[in-house]
Each structure stands twice: as structure tokens, then as C-alpha cells.
Image (cartoon, grey):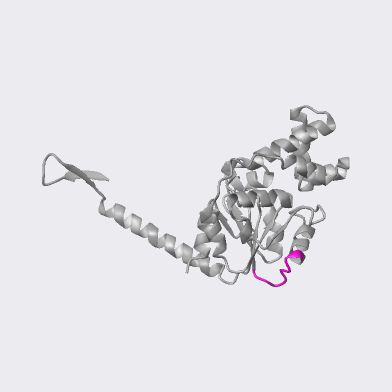
Amino acid sequence: MRARASAHPSESLPVPEAEDADAAAATLVEAAAEAAQLAQAFADTRLWIFDLDNTLYPAECNLFAQIDQRMSGFIQKLLGLDHAAARKVQKDLYYHYGTTLAGLMAEYGVKPEEFMDYVHDIDLAPVSPMPELDAAIARLEGRKFIFTNGSTRHAERVAAKLGVLDRFDGIFDIAAGNYVPKPKPESFSAFMRYCEGGDCKAAMFEDLPHNLEAAHALGIKTVLVRSDYLDHPSQHALAAATALPPYIHYETDDLTRFLDSIAAK
């Protein structure tokens, strides 16, 4: 944008150049076309599946970072390790078993309730109500569920703080799946039985790429919710990739905006 001379020599008024206006108009047309395509792609979806952590709430809250640190703290106390050693054990278990809890149960006989109560005892102050997200979820036609490797209590607390809890028909947590976590196919099968998904057209929103592979295998539309929080190797691999893998159909860094596009008429 440049200034041009006005009728009054003492004034200099900035005006948009023609090409700037044309570019802005083209951007708006392109955005409208993309929104229409998304709305059409999800028009027959009647089962909406949402991960919780770093998906329903923005990763910038750093809420999961609190959970992550408490998992390391639990292992530190359990095994008598220093923080660095406990952190290594935690990540090794997470990468190998799918969740830290699954590894602790398999290798150390940890009672899941004790672990879940400890790691989810966190401060929810960083989470703010998201009325726009609430409105976007409300506009989705069909049933909506939270599918989490965490606990129902944790999901309820966070969803209530976001102001979206009442929008969901149910929460399928790690206990409901007999402590078999995503991305295990058995976990997805148990979830589909729980929600009576059957042949219902479904879509899943998730921040961990590898958790979407099993969903894709079941014919579920998959949407990766991306952020700068990179923890799992699958996130680092995708960040370095030049294209999405075939089991991820869509991606977004703004869940509310994406849902708004889906609901566009």
C-alpha cells in the first residue's frame, strides 16, 4: 500500500492498490470455495469423534504439558529415579505401548486408577471458555463423542471448562476400552460398539497422526489437528514430510474454523 497525492497538499491518504484489492477478492473467493467443498465432503457425516487433549482445546494452553510432567513425576516416585531417568522411562513406555499407563501396567503392575488420579490432578486455569467452538459443535448434525486415552473425569472437567461438555452424547475413556489405548485397533472396535457406530458415516478429529490410521482403516474421515506441540515420533515425521499420509484426509490448525466451514450452508 502506497500513499498518493490528495487534493490538499497537506494531506496524504493511503489507498489500496488495484492489485491488492484483486488479491484480497481472490482470497475470499478461494476461501469460500474451500468451505463449500468441506461442507459437501462432510454433508452425510452423522457421527463426530473428538480426541480431547491438544485437540478440543488448543495446545497453546500447555495443559497436556502439566500431565506429561506429572507422568514423569509418578515414575520418578515409583522407581526411585531422578527426573531425567524417569522421563526416559516414560517416553520409552509411551512409544512402545501407546500410552505410559499401558506400559506401567504391563511392566510394573501399576493400578490404573492410582495413576490416572495422580496425572490428571492439574490446574485448568490455562483453559478458557470457547463459545465459538461450542457453537460450531452445536451446528454439527448427528451424535458427538469424546474418545480419549485419558479418564472420563479429566475429559468432563476440561470439556466443562471449555463450555462444550453438554454438546457430547458420551465419553469413551481408557477404562471403557479396558485400558487398551488408541491407536490399537481393539480400542477403536470397542469405541464403535460403545457408540453403536455401525455403518454410520463418521469423522474423527485428533492431534496424533498415528491415532488416525486405525480410524481410516474403519472408513472414518480423518482430520489432523496440528500444533507446534511435537512429542510423538509420528508428529515429528509428519512435520518433516512434504505431503499428508493417505490415512489423514484433512488437516487444520484451527478446529473451530474448520468446523465452521463444515457447517457452512
Answer whether residue 198 is magenta in the image: yes
Identify which residue is drawn at 83% across, 42% down.
104
What predominant SS class does the magenta segment belong to? Answer: loop
Classify residue 218 as left or right of residue 20.
right
- The one nearer the camera, 48 or 98, is 48
- The one nearer the camera, 62 or 205, is 62
Q: Is residue 149 visible?
A: no
Identify which residue is drawn at 72% across, 66% down.
195
Rendering coords of residue 192 (x, y %): 74, 65
Q: Residue furthest left?
A: 8
Identify which residue is drawn at 81% across, 31% down.
77
Check the image and report above or below for 29 versus 200: above
Answer whether residue 119 is magenta in the image: no
Rendering coords of residue 256 (x, y %): 53, 55
Classify residue 86 as left or right of residue 202.
right
Classify residue 64 as left or right of residue 179.
left
Image quadrant in which the N terminus is located: top left
Classify residue 202 as left or right of residue 129.
right
Rendering coords of residue 217 (x, y %): 71, 63
Rendering coords of residue 120 (x, y %): 72, 43
Query: In terms of image quadrants, where is residue 48?
Result: bottom right
Check the image and report above or below for 164 versus 117: below
Please provide the residue range marked out in magenta. Answer: 194-201
- The one nearer the camera, 136 or 231, is 136
Q: Is residue 114 visible?
A: yes
